[in-house]
Structures are given as C-alpha cells and as structure tokens.
Image (cartoon, grey):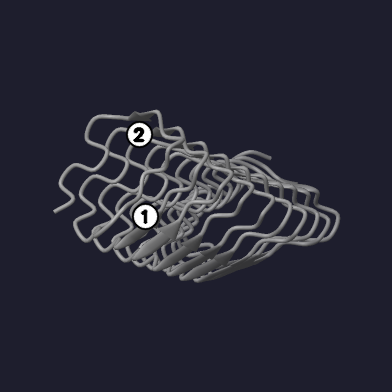
Amino acid sequence: GDNAFAYCKSLKSIIIPNGVTSIKDDTFNHCESLESIIIPNSVTFIGDHAFRDCKSLEEITIPNGITSIGVSAFESCYNLKTVTIPNGVTSIGDRAFAYCESLKSIIIPNGITSIGDRAFAYCKSLESVTIPNSVTSIGRHAFAYCKSLEEITIPNSVTIIWAGAFAYCKSLESVTIPNSVTSIGVSAFEGCSNLKTVTIPNGVTSIGRHAFAYCKSLEEITIPNSVTIIWAGAFAYCK
C-alpha cells in the first residue's frame, strides 16, 4: 500500500515477487540506501513519488505492463544512470525524472503522447534525448536546466512547445522546430547561451515572452510570415 516502505533509509535491495500488480504512491519514497530493485512484469502501475529520493539507485527497468509513470516517480534519484522505458508507456508524469543528475541519455519510446511538466528538469548530465513521433505535448520546463543537453529532435507530431520547455539548456547549439508547431511558449529556449541556429517554420503564429531571451550566441533567425505576434522580450539580450 501507500508509504509501505517509505523512509526505510537502510534498505539496500528488494525483490518484488511476480503477482504484484501495483506499486502505490510513496511506496519506496526516501529509501536513500536502495541500490537495486527488480520490478516484475506483473506490475502495471507505478504511483506518484514511488521511488522519489532513492539516492543510491543506479538503474531501473520499467516492466512492459506499465502504461504511465506517476508524478515524481523517480524524482531526485541522483545516482540513476540508466532507465529503460518500455513501449507500452503512454505518459510520463510531472517531475517523473526531475533532478536525476547522473542520467546521461534517455530514449522515449513510441506510444508516449505527453511528457509532463518538469519531467526531466535539472537532469544536468543528460546529453541526448530521443522523442518519438507519437509525442504531441512537451510540458512546461520539461527539459529545463539540462545543461549538458547538446541536441534535441522535436518530432512533427508536437504542436505546442510549452513555457520553459528547454530553458537554460546551455549546451544546446541548434534546434529545428517542426512544421507542426503553432506556438512557442514563454521562455521556451530562454538562457540557451550556446544556441547558434534556430529554424522557425511557417505555421508558427506566436512567439512567447522571453522565448529566446539570453540566447547570447544566436547569430541569425528568420521569422516566417505566419507569425502574428511576438511577445515582449522574445529575443531580449541576444547580443
């Protein structure tokens, strides 16, 4: 049940038997010494904060039966280096992997339609992300402060880049916004100080406040005829 092993700070390993179908909210929250866990294929649900602050956990394989990853499910797992997300997952909850500071790469499988707010925020070692064509929404601050992120491919299925989605991704050098996008949110790319090139397609109608502010390396940008409004400070401090 909820909080079953929460704050068991000396717990190092656990084997969950086949037959268990759900890991409830906060089940292993703040198990700071937990190094390994085997989640069986019978599990179809991982609740909110289920493994939050499991600071010693280095890898996790999410079983094939899972369809959604709960809010803050793995938030602040500072030593988490590898995560395997199966094809059956359709949504990644808000802050699901936020502050996973050792995570270097992530493959988001086909089938996922939404990436929650701050889902990967402050993953400071994250260098690459693969986002599939099934994703239609990249949440607010989803990848904000991923300061090692060098490249990102935004698929044609995405229609809105929400506020702060890639803010302060300081290693990002170029970005191509797909034809499907109609709106670039507030501070979407703010503080991407190494961003040199941006391609904005026809179809974008709105560029949000501070969308590209403090992009100090931005050399050239072409704003298409489809844009009807550029909000205050959209390109402020682009030296």
Q: Give SS at disc 2.
A: loop
Position above or below: 21 against 83: above
Tell me which amino acid carries mark 1: Tyr
Residue corresponding to mark 2: 208
User: What residue sits 19% from the left and 56% below the top?
Assistant: 216
Position above or below: 200 against 172: above
Badge 1, how many Cα within 10 Å: few under 14, some, many 20+?
many
The answer to whether the residue labelled 1 contacts the one labelled 2, judged by CB atoms less than 8 Å apart, is: no
User: What residue sits 42% from the left and 59% below the top?
Assistant: 175
Residue corresponding to mark 1: 122
Residue 155 is situated, as x and y percent measured from the top left of the image, at 59, 54
- Answer left or right for 58 relative to 227: right
User: What residue sits 55% from the left and 52% below the top?
Assistant: 51
* Camera-nearest residue between 150 and 204: 204
Q: Residue furthest front?
A: 225
Q: Please give the label number shown on residue 221.
A: none
Q: Whole-Å distance between the Cαs marked 1 and 2?
A: 22 Å
Disc on the earlier residue, 1 or 2:
1
Position above or below: 7 against 211: below
Badge 2, how many Cα within 10 Å: few under 14, some, many 20+?
many
- Answer left or right for 194 relative to 154: left
Residue 161 is situated, as x and y percent measured from the top left of the image, at 48, 41
Tell me which amino acid carries mark 2: Gly
| Residue 169, picture quadrant | bottom left
